[in-house]
Amino acid sequence: MEALRVVGGARLRGRVRVPGAKNSVLKLMAAALMVPGTTILRNVPDIADVAIMSELLRRLGCEVVADRTDGVLLITVPGQLEHRADYDLVRRLRASIAVLGPLMARLGEADIAVPGGDAIGSRGLDIHVRGLELMGAVVTSTGGYLHAAAPSGLHGIDYELDFPSVGATETLVTAAVGARGLTRLENCAREPEVADLCTMLAAMGVPITGIGSDTLTIEGASALAPVEHVVVPDRIVTGTWAFAAAMTGGQVTIDGARPEHLSLPCATLRAAGAHIEVTPGGMCVRGPDRPHAVDAVTLPFPGFPTDLQPHIIALDSIAEGSALVTENLFEARFRFVAELARLGANVKVDGHHCLITGVPRLSGAPVEGTDIRAAAALVLAGLVADGVTHVMHVHHIDRGYADFAQSLRGLGADVDRVRVNIADIVG
Ligand code: EPU
């Protein structure tokens, strides 16, 4: 299998550039389905999830052309679209559910394979479904597929989401674009990626208010036109570089970063002893010799992001003192803690709390990346471990980080992508 081989010890130094956000571009690609013609996306990251979403759009009838070196994606949407997302793609890309709202808006019908459980939790769809039903859709689940249809069309609703779910907010905002009348959604997710989607919809001609707030109103059934849109920079990739600098006692300038999307992670890193400076094009993070332990509680934006929870546990594992990290979004995300313990971290999980007592040094070992963020955080842990760490299941990292190993080498780390035979690297 493929692994990242990390030799610990380097202090990261230099510059990196952050591309567009995975969790935005996938939704923007899906939103392109709502209007025939060519949508142009810029600042698109060269990651596996974009390739899978491109394949899904092709199967729906679109032409998708990527210029990888320039981060440009051209999506040409035909007059006639298919309405089915098959299991072979959905099982590889849970975010395939992002086509549900746009297909409902455009066709009034969608068949989407139901994503199964994954490494970070059950991930329900009840809020998506409830909202669509209130809009007039009939939603059934048979044979592993969610079938939604609104033969008489969708209509606008007043709806307060039970929880500010990112995915449900996006499904309902996009479905509302094709609904008759006004939709008013309360308790919406406020993540920058949701705001990015709403900004693109507004440019397409959708009258939408409240962008970036928890209350969105969408006037449906307006005339739409395809647009050119620049994807918002990836705040989780930004955070990954910031934690890498802080943990290794290095100094990294992150070009393209939007520090205002990372207020709480930056405040947390400062409390850990890092120095963070906002630069004209992004931010610069300088790490302390050894970080102080810092607590964190994951919450919807603007709270501490669950996608940086493994990173803060990795930082706390080598910090001075003890810290408590609480996970409120994805119950199974602590699976990665057992892997961190293999590197010598002193970590104890109790329900959705994790208590970490820092040790001066970790010690390299083979570990398994269980999801994108866990795998990235294990690489950071490997950077501060004595000896060699192999992080297995690199395909998780490929889903969300473009050229991760190469970027790390550019900052002075000793990291390589290697093929390993597990028997050869285990003691
Ligand atoms: N939930 C429900 N019912 C619903 C919708 C959500 O119970 O109808 C629950 C989920 O089970 C979960 C919680 O609500 O426990 C949060 O789910 P949410 O819908 O907010 O998240 P998501 O849309 O599935 C996106 C990102 C995640 C990120 C979360 C939270 C994408 C493709 N994924 O997931 O990103 O962690 O928002 O910010 O946008 C990642 O990039 O590594 C990743 C997992």
Image (tube, helix red, strand yellow):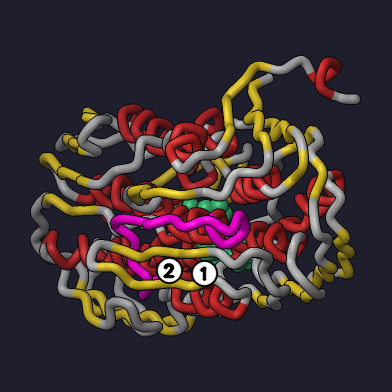
**Residue sitting at x 86%, y 50%:** 344
Membership of 252 in magenta stretch = yes
Cα separation, mark 2 vs mark 1, equals 6 Å
Q: Is residue 426 above or below residue 403?
A: above
Classify mark 2 as within 8 Å of ligand 1 or not, answering yes or no: yes
Query: Measured from the top left, where is residue 65 in percent x and y?
Result: 22, 28
Question: Disc 1 residue type?
Answer: Ser
> In the picture, which quadrant includes the N terminus?
top right
Q: Is residue 216 above or below residue 10?
A: below
- How many other residues sit within 10 Å of disc 1, few (<14), some (14-19) or many (≥20)? many
Query: Measured from the top left, where is residue 415 in percent x and y?
Result: 58, 32
Query: Which contiguous range is marked in magenta?
Result: 245-261
**Residue sitting at x 29%, y 43%:** 44
Instruction: Report the front residue among 409 and 61.
Output: 409
Q: Check disc 2 and report its element: helix, strand or loop.
A: helix
Which picture quadrant has residue 293? bottom right
